[in-house]
């Protein structure tokens, strides 16, 4: 559709949002609250190494992390995801989309994280029953095509967290813009996530930051091969994602001088730059089957054991279409002790009515 004044207004709003959020002092890692908001929402994203993608092909599971990809092709689509995380921890997502003429396409996503059951105990070891901990969020998303190449979108999120007797509520928004060139099969997205605040902190008066992040994603399907590559640039709001690890062999303390043996300038720059990069690939020989893989450098550096790295940071997955269902599975290696299992099932509910 041609770009009109209304579309320029939408685009301007998105750009202004990016300008204002540059002033925020974002936190990563263990700092901040509601970290579950940044956990991968689908088996596809997890298989390709990250938590979001820039692939415009009607996959409704991408709406939660990149609302600018929300499109009419998602109308009446439903997706369910479940992740068998670690020990008794599990989480999941349910997403539905509906398109309204002249307004755009909307999505609704419910996500939860269940930490399992814990035992009350004092410092002497006496127990007093059990308690649970859970996180929940309801996200309402909207997407609109500005013209043949550009689209925008936003998510509004209502957040609840209950950790034993401590409860917290919060609000957040995501804003995103995408460029999609069908002729070149190229998609580029810019996303700012979790711009918001706690309405009620766990402890009165102790307000904590949300897990804000700015990401850029790019994907392109090759012209003569059934293969799509993906490059993600994550956490662009903060350059240095490293931390002082006393076990890092490149930063040991000299026993004579007591000084820390630091990396040379080039190695240090390369290490910091690569912590922002996630690469992935998707081999799609047919519309009924695909194989995916990914590599996350930051995850490998933070969670790997120096003398035995194994496959930490690598991930893989596959997808098959059976009748009216797209079934996806993936595994991502976080450390040597185990790998979470991701399962996603997608379908278009309209397909069931066509046979009636």
Image (cartoon, helix red, strand yellow):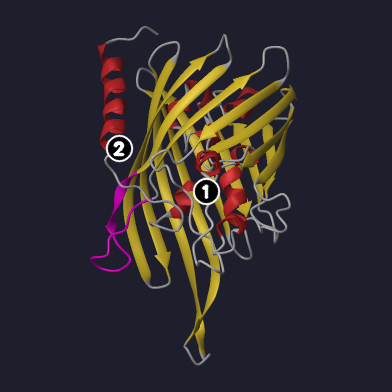
User: Quick one: which residue is furthest to the left in this view?
Assistant: 205
Badge 2, how many Cα within 10 Å: few under 14, some, many 20+? few
Residue 225, can we see it? yes
Residue at 45%, 54% in the rendered image? 35
Question: Residue 324: x percent and y percent?
Answer: 68, 30
Name the foreground residue: 314 vs 5: 314
Question: Residue 12: x percent and y percent?
Answer: 27, 22
209 up-or-down from 292: above or below? below
Q: Which mark is residue 22?
A: 2
Question: Residue 245: x percent and y percent?
Answer: 53, 60
Residue 70, can we see it? no
Q: Check residue 199 for magenta coloring.
A: yes
Quadrant of the rendered image containing residue 33: bottom left
Residue at 43%, 31% in the rendered image? 67
Question: Residue 341: x percent and y percent?
Answer: 67, 51
Label 1: which residue?
39
Task: Pick whichever of labels 1 and 2 is earlier in the sequence.
Answer: 2
Q: Check residue 191 for magenta coloring.
A: no
Q: Which residues are magenta?
A: 195-210
* Badge 1 vs badge 2, beta-carbon distance below 8 Å: no
As helix, strand or loop, the secondary structure at mark 2 comes to loop
Residue at 51%, 38% in the rendered image? 273
In this view, the mark in front (1 or 2): 2
76 up-or-down from 83: above or below? above
User: Quick one: which residue is furthest to the top in this view?
Assistant: 2
| Residues at marks 1 and 2, CA–CA distance in whole angstroms | 23 Å
- Left or right for 138, reference 252: left
- Left or right for 67, reference 39: left
238 up-or-down from 223: above or below? below
- Left or right for 207, reference 162: left
């Amino acid at each position: 559709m041609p770009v009109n004044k209304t579309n320029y207004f939408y685009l301007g709003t998105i750009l202004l949002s990016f300008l204002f959020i540059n002033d925020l002092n974002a936190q990563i890692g263990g700092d901040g609250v509601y970290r579950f908001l940044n956990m991968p929402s689908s088996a596809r994203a997890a298989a390709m190494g990250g938590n979001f993608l820039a692939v415009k092909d009607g996959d409704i599971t991408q709406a939660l992390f990149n609302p600018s990809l929300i499109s009419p092709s998602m109308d009446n689509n439903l997706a369910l995801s479940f992740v068998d995380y670690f020990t008794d921890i599990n989480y999941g997502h349910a997403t539905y989309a509906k398109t309204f003429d002249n307004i755009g396409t909307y999505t609704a996503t419910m996500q939860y994280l269940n930490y399992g059951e814990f035992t009350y105990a004092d410092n002497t070891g006496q127990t007093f029953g059990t308690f649970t901990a859970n996180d929940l969020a309801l996200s309402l998303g909207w997407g609109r095509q500005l013209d043949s190449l550009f689209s925008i979108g936003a998510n509004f999120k209502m957040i609840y967290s209950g950790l034993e007797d401590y409860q917290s509520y919060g609000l957040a928004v995501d804003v995103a813009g995408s460029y999609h060139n069908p002729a070149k099969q190229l998609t580029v997205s810019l996303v700012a996530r979790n711009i918001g605040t706690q309405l009620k902190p766990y402890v009165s008066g102790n307000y904590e930051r949300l897990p804000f992040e700015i990401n850029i994603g790019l994907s392109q399907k090759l012209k003569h091969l059934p293969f799509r590559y993906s490059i993600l640039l994550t956490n662009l709001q903060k350059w240095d994602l490293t931390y002082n690890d006393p076990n890092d062999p490149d930063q040991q303390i000299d026993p004579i001088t007591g000084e820390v043996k630091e990396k040379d300038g080039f190695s240090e720059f390369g290490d910091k730059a690569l912590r922002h990069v996630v690469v992935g690939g998707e081999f799609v020989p047919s519309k009924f089957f695909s194989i995916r893989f990914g590599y996350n450098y930051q995850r490998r550096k933070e969670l790997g054991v120096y003398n035995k790295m194994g496959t930490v940071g690598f991930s893989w997955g596959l997808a098959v279409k059976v009748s009216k269902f797209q079934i996806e599975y993936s595994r991502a290696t976080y450390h040597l002790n185990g790998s979470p299992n991701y399962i996603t099932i997608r379908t278009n509910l309209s397909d069931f009515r066509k046979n009636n």
